[in-house]
Amino acid sequence: MRIAVIGGDGIGPEVIAEAIKVLRATVADAAIETTSYDLGAQRYARTGEILPDSVLAELAAQDAILLGAVGDPNVPSGILERGLVLRLRFEFDQYVNLRPVRLFPGISSPLTATAAAPLDMLVVREGTEGAYIEAGGILRRGTPAEIAMQESINTAFGVGRVTRQAFAAAAARPRRKLTLVHKTNVLAHAGDLWRRTFEATAADFPEVAADYCHVDAALAYMVTQPDLFDVIVTDNLFGDVLTALGAAIGGIGLAASASINPERTAPSTFEPVHGSAPDIAGKQKADPTAAILSVALLCDHLGMTSQASRIEQAVADDLLERQGEWAGRSTAEVGDDIAERVSG
């Protein structure tokens, strides 16, 4: 198992170190080969490079990429995100972005007293189309007549393949329910493509209950009636917004993600979504649990389902025991405790 390790910025290297520790405790150490890459704000400051083509070629030979975080107050917003995170998604055709939204026992949340059932949903977000491909441009920049155009590109091919992946994911879960989230009443063209594709694909998965929800209503229901959802499939932009809310209600320190190339023709990327938190970098105050849960997604993607389950259970047991409290532990001590659970 060849894993590219990109610690990135801020707390990224700290939490990724613990994720690797847990991975090595779960999988035979000899089966893991890691290669570290210096990518992020520090390299950009030194060289002006974000993701050189030579490094991209090396990454292409890996089985998976473990990414800590990118972002630094000294680098203008968007440069690292577009040049590194989005480029990996586009170059490696990571068209499925998976974001579990789960409220673990022992963790407090704004929804602790709201959900009629345990909060456990999966957002399947399209990752290589939509508004993030930078189609458009600016005319008459800096004048009172400036025009900014940002186009959302949706193809039958792209919508079809991510929708099919979402149905397959829903079919594998106990509730077997999939909700398309979009804005078909206003975004008539893209919305129509998504809805027609969704309805056509549903015919191939009769065991899955399929329904639709406008994105604004879905955001409200995620707070007021989160148990309405099991698996959600949506476009790139709506998925970004929905999963940001999901991280808030499930615990930002527990938010794992995966940008998947399902056919494994290129590596997939696994990363926590809590950001680089430069204010606590180097202080061993960051919770590495989201990075550790991202490693569980990595194991599952590479066919090691039992190992993924062991990691998830070890995290759940750790969270329940500490009832959401740090109990004086450092970042490394949390990693030690979870690694001990999976190895024991």
Image (tube, rainbow, N blue to C red):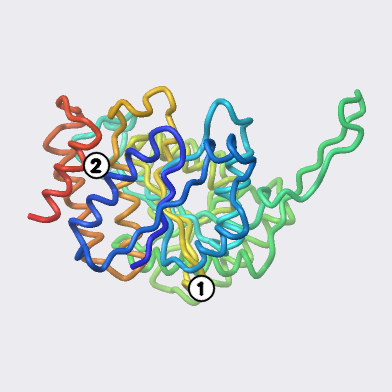
Depth order, front residue of 252/328 = 328
> Which of labels 1 and 2 is toward the front?
1
Callout 1: few (<14), some (14-19), or many (20+) C-alpha neighbours within 10 Å? Answer: few
Specify the quadrant that holds the C terminus.
bottom left
* Residue behind mark 2: 104
Picture residue at 42% right of the left edge, 62% below the top = 64
- Percent position of residue 131, x then y: 68, 48
Instruction: Name the residue located 34 percent from the left edge and 28 percent from the top edge.
Output: 282
Secondary structure under tag 1 reads loop
Residue 337 image offset from top left, x and y in percent? 14, 42
Residue type of the residue flagged with mark 1 = Thr
Residue 19 left/right relative to 66? left
User: Residue 122, how many percent across, how many down?
Assistant: 40, 53
| Residue matched to label 1 | 265
Kindly identify the amino acid type of the residue bearing the numbered disc 2: Phe
Q: Secondary structure at mark 2?
A: loop
Q: Where is 344 relative to 170, above or below?
A: above
Q: In this rendering, would 99 be left or right of 110?
A: right
Residue ID at (31%, 31%):
286
For residue 26, which quarter of the picture?
Answer: bottom left
